């Protein structure tokens, strides 16, 4: 069962990263158009800045959520690697619980914030300001899923979420 959930998480994470990448590309194109229109055509579009900010919020928050599954968030493992495995495992479980709690806060308060701000409008776009905050609860739900899977995996299979020391990673890379 855990392997199925892990495979689902991997696919979901890839979809999230594709969406975030598309948002980054779209934002880059919009900013490029903004610069061209302002300095060459002398007619700056009113919608470009707010659209770029909206896209940036979406891709940054969603990519950060995927980072918990992909493992690309920075963390320092020196202390964890220096401790006995039982204590290191306890640290991994506690870290996952803290991140799960943060995911719940993002989910709950993100929904609350989206509801509170829903009557406000982004003037240049004519859409609800809540669209800027929708990624918070979505990312919170993804973080809960990804980190809960890691937590359960560590409970069922001790060492499942353990990172290899850099020496092992370099040794494995040398075998290629």
Image (tube, rainbow, N blue to C red):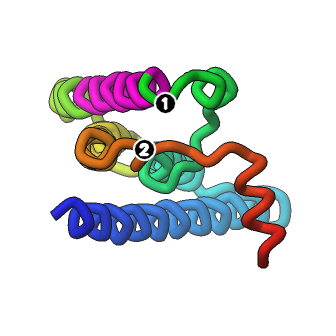
Examine the rendered structure and indicate whether residue 57 appears above or below residue 104.
below
Q: Position of residue 101 (x, y in %)?
A: 28, 24
Examine the rendered structure and indicate whether residue 81 appears above or below residue 152.
above
Density class for disc 1 (Cα within 10 Å; few <14, some 14-19, many ≥20) is some
Q: Position of residue 26 (x, y in %)?
A: 56, 67
Residue name at image x 57 percent, y 55 percent: 48
Q: Is residue 99 magenta?
A: yes
Q: Is residue 64 left or right of residue 10?
A: right
- Please name the predominant secondary structure of the magenta segment in the image: helix
Q: Is residue 145 magenta?
A: no
In the rendered image, which quarter is residue 24 located in? bottom right
Q: Residue 134 or 38: which is nearer the viewer?
A: 134
Residue name at image x 62 percent, y 30 percent: 81
Which quadrant of the figure contains the N terminus? bottom left
Q: Find disc 1 in the rendering and name its residue.
A: 85
Q: Find disc 2 in the rendering and name its residue.
A: 159
């Amino acid at each position: 069962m855990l392997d199925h959930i892990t495979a689902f998480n991997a696919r979901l994470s890839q979809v999230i990263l594709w969406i975030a990448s598309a948002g980054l590309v779209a934002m880059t194109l919009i900013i490029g158009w903004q610069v061209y229109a302002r300095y060459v055509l002398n007619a700056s579009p009113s919608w470009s800045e707010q659209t770029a900010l909206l896209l940036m919020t979406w891709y940054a928050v969603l990519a950060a959520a995927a980072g918990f599954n992909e493992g690309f968030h920075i963390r320092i493992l020196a202390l964890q690697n220096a401790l006995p495995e039982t204590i290191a495992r306890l640290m991994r479980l506690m870290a996952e619980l803290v991140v799960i709690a943060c995911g719940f806060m993002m989910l709950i308060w993100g929904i609350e914030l989206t509801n509170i701000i829903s009557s406000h409008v982004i003037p240049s776009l004519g859409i609800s300001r809540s669209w800027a905050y929708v990624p918070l609860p979505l990312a919170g739900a993804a973080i809960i899923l990804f980190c809960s899977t890691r937590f359960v995996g560590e409970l069922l299979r001790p060492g499942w979420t353990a990172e290899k020391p850099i020496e092992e990673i370099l040794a494995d890379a040398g075998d290629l």
